[in-house]
Amino acid sequence: MQATALGRSTGVESHPTLSRSTRPSEVGRGRTAPGPERSTRCTTGRLQWTSVGSERESLSSRGRPSAGSSLPGLRRTITHTGYCVPSRHEAGLKTALACPVFDIRRPMGEWGQVTLFRTEDLDALGRVIRDICLAEGLVAVPYVRRKRETWDRMQYGTGATSDRWALALGAGLGGWSVVKTAPLELLAEPGASGENRLGLIARRLGCEALHVSLYDVTAMVIAQAVPTGEVALSGYSMDGASFHGVEIEEHRLEPRIEGPGIPPSVQEALGHFLSDGFDELIEKLAGQHWVDVSLKLIDGDEIPSARVFSFMRPALEKRPPLRVKLAVEEHPLGTRYVLDEGVWLTSVSIDAATSALGAAFVEKVARWLEVPVALEPGVPRSLFCVRAPPSEYTQRAGVETELVSLGDDGGGEFLLHTWLGLGSAEIEECSPHQRSHLVTRLTHALVGARTNDPAAYRDFERVFNEPTTHAVGAFAGERLITAWWRLGRSAVAMEGHDVFELPGLCTAIASTPRQLALALVTPGHVSGHSQGYGQKDRSVIVVIDVDTGEAREALRSDGHLTFGFTQLAFAGDLLGVSAERDGVPTIVMLEGESRTELPGDFSEWARSAMQPPLGADSPHSSHEPQRPLCDAAGLEPVAFSASGARCLARIDARRLFVGMRARPGE
């Protein structure tokens, strides 16, 4: 059984001049870009908006993690006949998700960060911060106005990936001093030495320190340092139980603020809603005038109430541009550039056709930048990117110049100069300081990595090459079946048949050896390459004979029965459909021409109606030691063929790969 999520979300896109209550502008390691180039999925109430380039999935506004999220506790579903395998962290996040910190009535898109030190000695605080910045190789520079990039390193990067740092510090309330930074979580990150900067400053000043990051209302990380420098983390970020590479212990997944100098009202408000706790913290220890200071730091605006520090990495000589081949492809969901015959660049992602082609490209870039690299190709993992004109560049006749910003893990960036009529392009580095990081991010996106241990399934290959925003897959016996979104329609590929199209977006799939069921919803809104749908949008269930390819409509929504967000599962030849009748959760059961309904929870029905398939609970022989299922890092098993000979896996909600079971001894 493969189930679609109720609203996979990366946050609501917002303009950078909106107020904090609706703007993702101060998110640490930002997840949503201003402007139309960043594509997202978001859920407000019961509407899912899906635009062409959504790369990130996180918490939904319905108060639980969405499918594809990296949050611990997410139930991972392996499609065979519906056997579910929980993630190893599931129990650990139950307490955190059970806390009353989510509310569907609250607006999505509320982000914020603040760093506080329990001292009133601003001179000493400023000296320590300055010493740390200089020790990390930066130099003090004048604080001036600047033009921000569409995906600016000071806003969406980290201290390691941004060549410019800016900090504002001033008096807070209750004996605390406030520091706002750009990059936004600068002082809560590990520094160049590996020591957390928050703990380092706290130790040098002999005071308590606190950093709080609120992400889109749905997640929060709290870092607290004691005067001896030890730092404790609690909560969870948009990357799950991890914060700048540091794992958060399972028993601390519930955000908490504790210790001397913290008013009890802050923790009390935090117990109601995350955003309430953040607002109360600002109100009691900082003051509302600090809320938007990080945005001003990015732009170089005047901040009368604060002392401002500005630092940059020293200038280094750039390498000459690198020439690459260029081809242009047109697809239902937009244009795709192909670099060196195997690297795919769309308006929102960078990917590779195969890990071998990706490795050849990365090795070429590494030689150009003189960065040593050792590759162990797995499968390309892709990265979301933003392509936009750079804020400052010299226009050349016949040449289109774009700044390509890779957004993951602090990101990386390069300039792409294209001569569309000549079939060639040039890559220009943006910062010599970021060479290693750029190669690392390209390796992640285009090459991936092998797991260290022998795996049960190996040699994974991409299932289809067309760019899409969502794909589902299953096995009908031994036959692989996949479906992926186009604009208002879905492509369906069944082994043994030609690819064909069906109207609507395929949101769920289930199968038996003889038949296939697809849920298809008509998007309620289409704008350009963006499309969105809701629970009440027109939906159908189509059942297809796997041998003949004959399709029939088995169920259609109406004014009372709705299933825009649905799940499907077969129990023998009986098909179960998750639906709502007049807003009440309902299970629709279809078998041949008969149809019955009963109110209830679909997941409970599926668990009771279905048995784990033979061998699906353990792809290993009883004589084999436990080992990873997939030989490539990042792959998540989705389905097994009936014999267990093949495994369908995914990198994310849009990229599917199929691998073969390893032979004994491999």
Image (tube, rainbow, N blue to C red):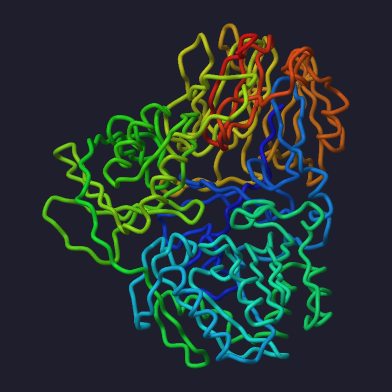
Residue 419 placement: quadrant: top left
Residue lying at 40% horizontally and 70% vertically, measured from the top left: 164
Viewer-proximal residue, 569 or 348? Answer: 348
Q: Given the current orientation, which residue lies at the most extreme left position? A: 397
Quarter that holds the N terminus? top right
Q: Given the current orientation, which residue lies at the most extreme top position? A: 547
Residue 402 placement: quadrant: bottom left
**Where is residue 130 shown, x and y percent of the image?**
48, 80
**Where is residue 503 shown, x and y percent of the image?**
52, 30
Viewer-proximal residue, 523 or 38? Answer: 38
Classify 293 as above or below 232. Answer: below
Viewer-proximal residue, 555 or 183? Answer: 183
Q: Is residue 526 left or right of residue 644?
A: left
Residue 411 placement: quadrant: bottom left
Classify 452 as above or below 128. Answer: above
Q: Is residue 323 left or right of residue 590?
A: left
